[in-house]
Amino acid sequence: MSRVSFDSTKLPLDEILKKASTGLLQLPDFQRGWVWDDEGLRGLLASVSKSFPVGALMTLQTGGEVNFKPRLIEGAPANNNGVTPDALLLDGQQRITSLFQTTMRKEVIETINAKKQRIDRFFYIDMAKALDDGADRMDAIVGIQKTKIETRSFGKDIVRDLSNPEQEYALCMFPTNCIFDSDEWQMGFIKHWGYNKDKVEFWFNFQNEVLAAFKQYQMPVIQLGKGTSREAVCLVFEKVNTGGKKLDAFELLTAIYAGEEPGFMLREKWAGCSKRLAESIAVKENPLTRLQATEFFQALALVHTFDRRRTHVTSGADGDAPPVICTRATVLSIPLAAYKKHADRLEEGFRKAGKFLFGQHIYWFKDIPYQSQLVPLAAILAQLGERWEFDAVRAKLAQWYWCGVFGELYGGAIETRFAKDLVDVLAWIDGGTEPTTVKDAAFRAERLDTMTSRLSAAYKGTHALLMKEGAQDFRSGQPFNQASYFDEAVDIHHVFPRAWCDKAKIGRDKYDTIINKTPLSYKTNRVIGGDAPSVYLTGLAKKGGVTGPSIDGHLRSHMIERSLLRADNFDGFIKARRESLLSLIERAMGKVAYRGEATDEPEGEQVIDEAEALEFA
């Protein structure tokens, strides 16, 4: 259950920065590095110097349920590395680090310019400009290179020399790293000007109007108490940190595990696992190359809770058995011991999932109907062990998988289905009743008439089933295995070409469906061009040296009635192939499709989620 205990207050900026320096305020280890550029630093300093709001901070009190590995604010003294922090900064890292670097550290600041090039800078306030009401305060904040000498004409002409305090005094350029400790600089400045009355007054005006803004600045702080749960921290962080790195369960677990066992590097372990899985199939962009850490840990939650439930049942313990579940709260509560116990077995489960997809002729990560379905698939295979190699077991796995695809059951909130899949499919394999996913799956014949998006699960599924059924390239007669798929740049193409259909005044809603598409090699599609089938089939015979009977055999392998294609009979072709594809889908699902009239409102094309869709852009 998500629990949040919090308080809202305001704290002096100098107090916050001093805590950052001493290590009493640190960052959770999942926070990204400091990335603000030169212009951003100047803008932040200008805003604070004018007492403008720069946003609230959010901290988490340490010592509670959430035990993150801490790390010092970038630039804080390294000798404070062993200090136990009172609080961790969840939101505001970039602002606090920027202010700490520019106002508290005496060392040069490593930042970047507008071109994203690394530069070294010291920052100054042009005192005269800062006191000029008509000047832009941003122009009063100056960044100068490491030597503190600004030049032009390739270093020939010195524009400004601030290489020693006397030069700073003479040019009235106040170093920002003296803002909270200005007494020594003040005495040097007044002494340099011989206690000149006008300069003394000038200094105190600067101190009262500019430096006082920093010293009196109060930052709003939302303080999360130690009673805040892991899930609540994740949810809160996502809401407040929209401009920064998106926090997911994996990032939280990385910090939590490191806090529980110093030196335990979950990120490195995942990188190794991810690399091994991607290389377990000898194809560069195979289905496992885009596996996300969050998906792995969702599957781990399934395996862990399944193991926990089985232990409860077999031990005869009292009370209800704990559920199999993989919500975010469950993922965040996976103990480190459970990760160590199950991670290797689950990695093997994902490796087998990749092999299973290859067996279904799904070779490319973009061709996976539902990336999310990998989660229960891997968990099931992790539990099955070597049993997954039995024909009867593979047949049931395939039926469950295709029911999920053509039933289009994995496009929404699916955590509950994942859990049921693991329990139901394993029980089914052991002789139990059909899984809920198989029972729920239904395919309407009319769905074929609306499958036009290459992003939809059912569209991709039909493409894979045609290759699995033994479809051969029109020109070469080569079946589509993993080698030819990539070597021949196989993709799904129109049988009746788009250009021909447009000339024949056939609507796009008819010619752009999966019924009029089939897997073909790049070269074959080039030969087809925009010609009528009767023309390109003749061309294939001439250019490819393929006989008519051979081409007819190739067409049959695609479930295409050759006589209708040779006669350029589009309507007849669509009607016949629609039935053939329907039979193909029925065999894969192990159940009859619905061929009657739809009684409810037709649904639009279901496609993959936005994040996956970007992969196709």
Image (cartoon, rainbow, N blue to C red):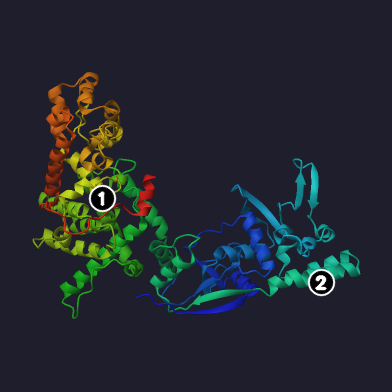
Q: Going by the image, does 369 lie left or right of 138?
A: left
Which amino acid lies under the numbered mark 1 shown in the image of this protein? Ala
Whole-percent x and y of residue 509?
26, 43
Give above or below for 256 relative to 358.
below
* Category of crowding for the residue at label 1, using alpha-carbon neighbours closer than 10 angstroms: few (below 14), some (14–19), many (at least 20): many
Residue found at x 15% / y 28%: 567
Q: Going by the image, does 9 lie left or right of 512?
A: right
For residue 204, the mark is: 2
Q: Is residue 220 visible?
A: yes
For residue 457, the mark is: 1
- Quarter where residue 311 is shown: bottom left
Front-lying residue, 479 or 293: 479
Whole-percent x and y of residue 604?
27, 53
Q: Going by the image, does 66 lie left or right of 119?
A: left
Residue found at x 34% / y 41%: 284
Which amino acid lies under the numbered mark 2 shown in the image of this protein? Phe
Whole-percent x and y of residue 336?
35, 67
Residue found at x 23% / y 33%: 496
Q: Going by the image, does 50 lie left or right of 588?
A: right
Query: At numbered mark 2, what does the secondary structure look like: helix, strand or loop?
Result: helix
Q: Quadrant of the N terminus?
A: bottom left
Query: Do residues under tags 2 and 1 come within 8 Å of each other at their CB atoms?
Result: no
Q: Is residue 355 visible?
A: no
| CA distance for labels 2 and 1 | 70 Å
Front-lying residue, 14 or 493: 493
Which badge, 2 or 1, comes first in the chain's sequence? Answer: 2
The residue most toward the left is: 431
Query: At numbered mark 1, what does the secondary structure look like: helix, strand or loop?
Result: helix
